Amino acid sequence: MTNRILFIIMLVAGLTAPLYAYPVFVMDLLCFALFACAFNLLLGYAGLLSFGHAAFFGGAAYITGYVTKEWGFTPLLGVLAGAGFALVIGTVFGFLAIRRQGIYFAMVTLALAQIIYFLALQMPFTGGENGLQGIPRGHLFGLIDLNNSLAMYYFVFAIFLIGFGIIYRTINSPFGEVLQAIRENESRALSLGYDVDHFKLLAFVISATLAGLAGATKAIIFQFAALTNAHWQTSGEVILMTLVGGLGTVFGPVLGAITVGALSHELSAFGSWVQVILGTIFVVCVMVFRRGIIGEIQRLASRKQG
Amino acid sequence: MSMQVILAQALLGLNVGVFYAMLSLGLAVIFGLLNIINFAHGAMYMLGAFIALIGYSFLEQWFGISVQIGFWASLILVPLLVGLLGVTIERLLLRRLYDLDHIYGLLLTFGITLILQGLFSNYFNVSGTPYPGQPESLSGVVDLGFMYFPTYRLFAIVFSLVVCFATWFFIEHTKLGSRLRAGVENPDLTQAFGLNVPLMITLTFAFGAGLAGLAGVLAAPIYSVSPLMGADLIIVVFAVVVIGGMGSIMGAILSGLALGLVEGLTKVFYPPAASTVIFFLMVLVLLFRPAGLFGKEK
């Protein structure tokens, strides 16, 4: 019930956002919101902490940029190509990472993501530290000019809704139930006859692909694939967004992405102090605010009822 | 390709390897007792280098104290200061997270990393500041027969090796070390025998932090001191730890040295892969020996 209300709020806010906010800024937030939702599927529901999601987010952006710029792919195909790339490396990384558990899983994903980062820095087509620039926005279905910022906005919002829908469906399916069972007690799920590794890998691949979808979309919006998107700090940022909004809640990551994104934007004049502030929020969240915003609201609501 | 070039790169690789060894040793010691991975380990290494730099070059300019803390003094003072920071972090923050999932310890130390890195980025250039305090007695080069090698680098290698093996000896062969190992094996029982386990945990964390700080001081004259120096290093050290497995102290030291060597040699044979070769080795280890070279299968 609450989910339905929250979804309607999100839908209305999303549809009307260009009326009162700068579209490019909101599009950026939507990309990060989708990225955080994808990340949350893995940590919040399967209990796997990936410290390398920037590889999918940033890596997909480069692929999308390359195929639209050099091969003349349409924006939609370009975005799909980026997400497809994330799917492929997600499968490889997932296969390797699930061989270790807990804290090792985090370290393995971080180290693997670093390979993508160095490739993005060194490959001939990526533009090194400058990133891949001059990506065309192109025409959607050959008809709608995405250089129009409103058209672009609703294209991005549609992608966000599709990604969000896939995640929502995944969580509320038998598959999602099994994931949560694995999170709660892996040995028990195993003894019930579930092929735990299979479930973990599939969750990892879905999460990676949607993170890639978010990064690919971002490349089209800004016409630019940035090296920072593949940096480990981006992996940290998405963790922070999910944590602030509420780990393992449906709408938490969206709210977290908006909060952290707006905060970074407001504080951007302070230079490196932003990092200090984000770090402090991280510490505060871990110490006293582990449920996140949505999680705390849910707890208060259930206490009132009970 | 001459033998000399290869030997020279191998020695430079060993130079990097001792830093890997010291940092992965610290991570392994902390992990053994606390079961957490200290993401801030890289930041503490950076902090060590910066305290040495500030002590040497900026005390008068910033604080109006006309004292200059030299390299040798830093070598003793800095690990103590970074260790003290470790005590503070453990007592105030980490201690409250032991009952939770271990990933919260990782996330907390990640936050601390951002804070430290951001703080120093405000006052220092990201591209690095040179540390001018290298002692006179260690300048110049030594003739090793097959090549001339900077005296300071040789000193850094020998000194780090001594520290690593002293740590190993202390943990594996002294009475205090055996108590520590008992704490790793079974903290509750160890406490029941009257040993102060919480104090042991605090001191262990401080020791690991101090080791990172010490590595930072040693690194300062070689690399330029930069707010990002720790972050770039720590991710490689994570891969080293995954390759070696954190079960054994000697394993952490040896895999650190060996991987530094591999990285150095890659620079000779295929330079573009030098920054990623360790990650690819990690992939191989995960495929064929998931528990790590020195790790125990669970």
Image: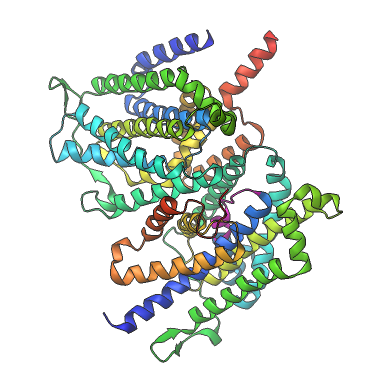
Determine the residue positioned at 80% across, 53% down.
B190
Residue B183, percent from left and from top: 75, 54
Which residue is at a point 78% across and 67% down the rendered structure image? Answer: B175
Drawn side of residue A213 relative to residue B201, left or right: left
From the viewer's perspective, tell me whether residue B93 is left or right of residue A117.
right
> Residue furthest toward the right?
B194
The reply, left or right, for residue A33 in relation to residue B113 is: left
Q: Nearer the viewer, residue B270 or B61?
A: B270
Q: Is residue B49 visible?
A: no
Name the quadrant containing residue A67: top left
Residue B47 locus on image (x, y percent): 57, 60
Quadrant in which the N terminus of chain B is drawn: bottom left
Q: Nearer the viewer, residue A195 or A18?
A: A195
Q: Tell me, yes or no, whether the highlighted magenta stretch contains residue B39.
A: yes
Q: Which residues are magenta?
A: B35-45
Q: Observer-nearest residue: B195 or B78?
A: B195
